[in-house]
Image (spheres, rainbow, N blue to C red):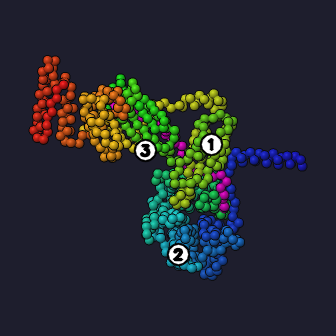
Amino acid sequence: MKNKQLLLILLAILFHQTSAGQAETYTVKRTAFSSDFYDEFAPVFYQNGLVFVTNRSSGVTDYSTSQDANFTKIFFIDTDGKKTRPKLFSKYLRTRLNDGPATFNAGSDTIYFSNNLITEGNLRKISSMRNKLGIFYAVKEGKKWTKIREMRFNNEWYNISTPCLSPDGRRLYFASDKPDGFGGTDIYYSERKGEYWSDPVNLGPEINTDGNESYPFVTAEGELYFSSDGHPGLGGKDIFFSSMKDGKWQTPVRLDAPVNSEYDDFALIADPMGEGGYFTTNRDNSMDIYEFSTVSPQIFYAELQKDNQYCFSFSDPGNIEIDTLFLKYVWDFGDGIKAEGAEAGHCFPGPGKYNVRLDIVDKQNGNLFFTKLMLELELRDVEQPYITSPDALVSGETVDFDAHRSFLPGFDIVSLAWDFGDGTKGEGESVKHSYDKPGEYTVRLGLKLKSRSKGSIHNEGISKKVHVSGSQAERDRWLAARIPDRSEYADFRQSTGLSVSTVYSAENESSKDIVYRIDLMSSEERIGTGSNVFSKIGPKYTIREETDPSSGSWLYYISDEHLNLMSAYPAWSELKSAGFNDARVMINVITDPVRKELISLLKNYGVSDEFYFDSYNRLRANAYLMLDQVVMLLNRNPGLRLEVGVH
């Protein structure tokens, strides 16, 4: 007796360790209303119970035919109440041949169901293989199902069956052995357009194979469960899951055992949360309806997690040249960090909005000379579930895995499931885990998400690879080899996940007709050009004033204009030394046509006296050409006046 008790204890301990390490995804049990002698299959939710198909006796006597011999009928079972005995769903939908499977609209007042196309006449003739299956529909009026009609795409040459109406009522999915398919039976859908149903559309080779696909079930988010003997499975028919991504069906995933088995498993339906449902199997010698419950949510798809990009390279195109002997580039990234140089790499601390600017600064005193670029950056995380954990750890070390940084706008997380790639699983937003052995592991995170706008539930998944080392030193070496080089940073202009708004770009302005001028200061009150404020400048520079139309303030600047940026540097330095701390060089875009022409002449012929006078102060050929152009400009514009200055 003691040995027996010890054996039982050891078995219990062993079972506990195995189940804890490799938790089952589902539990299943046969429903009480499934019989040993008849077939029950293709359940569908209806009000407080299930509608299903069976070849058991309907209980309605018809002395003119062999009583329901091998023909299927549509039954109903109340799964919430005390009435546990199935009954014929409706005598108004019962025919002499095969009835069902069925599907209902959201209001439960319209039924779509399979029937043989011909139900009247000699039983032997109408029960032949030539009498194909089609889909019919009926409307409930009171307790009766009336106005029975057949779908417009039914055809006497092939079968159309196993209908499933999408929860929004817009699509009817079904199986058919149409000759234009990929194999035996394929899954199709028809789109409802007003009172009209479109021609059937094949779901394509991602779903359909050269085998048989049937019994579609579609969730509110368009996720598809179906049965197939063409996709790799455990044997016979298996139940698969697929969902759309970027307009295409993803490769179907087989549901884990014990939902699937070596026998035929098909016709699954699930509750909106995917926590449970029903399916059909013949693992007990007849087709029975089983109930399943989700123990640990199955992660169907988990593409590799994309790294959130926070590091970028910034560079100056260099169309506006500066003399780096006197000036330097300074990047201000708007997060408290600055960097020098025409090119710079920077890592932002995380998502958010940043004001980035590129300034040209005097090397000697750090004064701002010119602003080349002003940007507004909005950095967003990739819209995806996100696994936060160390990339590398040591075997035996317990670390945290969490999903706090998942960025899924428009959705609320309902549940989270983890698969650590070593046979163990977990649940919750944050979990702890350790690996027993070194190696590369793929951690998968599955989420159920609820749409805030529609309230529907769908599945999402993500995965991440982690490296498990045998020692701390090995882990450190592995991490050191993965530190990215700044030269590998993506250019901010070409990066996804980064919204860039250009507030100001001197490079863009330089493609226009421009000159450079020195702005001295701005004031909300008018100062006047003759004010003592400007007494230190003296007669060398002429001061002008204008109002800023955007702010209404008064601007004071030097009248001299410069064709290139560096030619303004000596005057700017002198004015800075005179105490005008706010002085800076600005671009002035020329809009007046005459001024544009004059600026063009200056750019073409230059402004240095070396271009116009030789060493004996005689006019060069360029000077004559320039004077000719000036005379022509004066002739075209009689209102112009020529000012001659000598100094």
Seen in the picture, residue 492 relative to 166 is either above or below; the reply is: above
Sequence-wise, the earlier of marks 3 and 2 is 2
Circle 2 residues within 10 Å: few <14, some 14–19, many ≥20: some
Q: Does 238 sit above or below residue 67?
A: above
- Residue 398: give x, y in percent of width and height: 67, 38
Residue 212 location in percent, x, y?
A: 54, 58
Report the amino acid beneath label 1: Phe
- Mark 2 or mark 1: whose residue is earlier in sequence: 2
Q: Earlier in the sequence, mark 1 or mark 3?
A: 1
Which residue is tagged 3? 499
Q: How dense is the environment of label 1, judged by Cα within 10 Å: few (below 14), some, or many (20 and up)? A: many
The three-letter amino acid code for the residue at tag 3 is Ser
Name the residue carrying label 1: 401
Q: Which amino acid, mark 2? A: Val
The segment highlighted magenta reads 290-319
Q: Which residue lies at the image location 63% right of the left edge and 70% below the top edge?
A: 48
Q: Are marks 1 and 3 in contact (CB under 8 Å)?
A: no
Q: Is residue 306 magenta?
A: yes
Name the quadrant of the C terminus.
top left
Residue 22 is at least partly visible in this image: yes
Residue under the image location 43 percent in, 65 percent down: 199
Determine the main secondary structure of the stretch shown in magenta. Answer: loop
What residue did someone put label 2 on?
139
| Structural distance between the alpha carbons of marks 2 and 1 | 52 Å
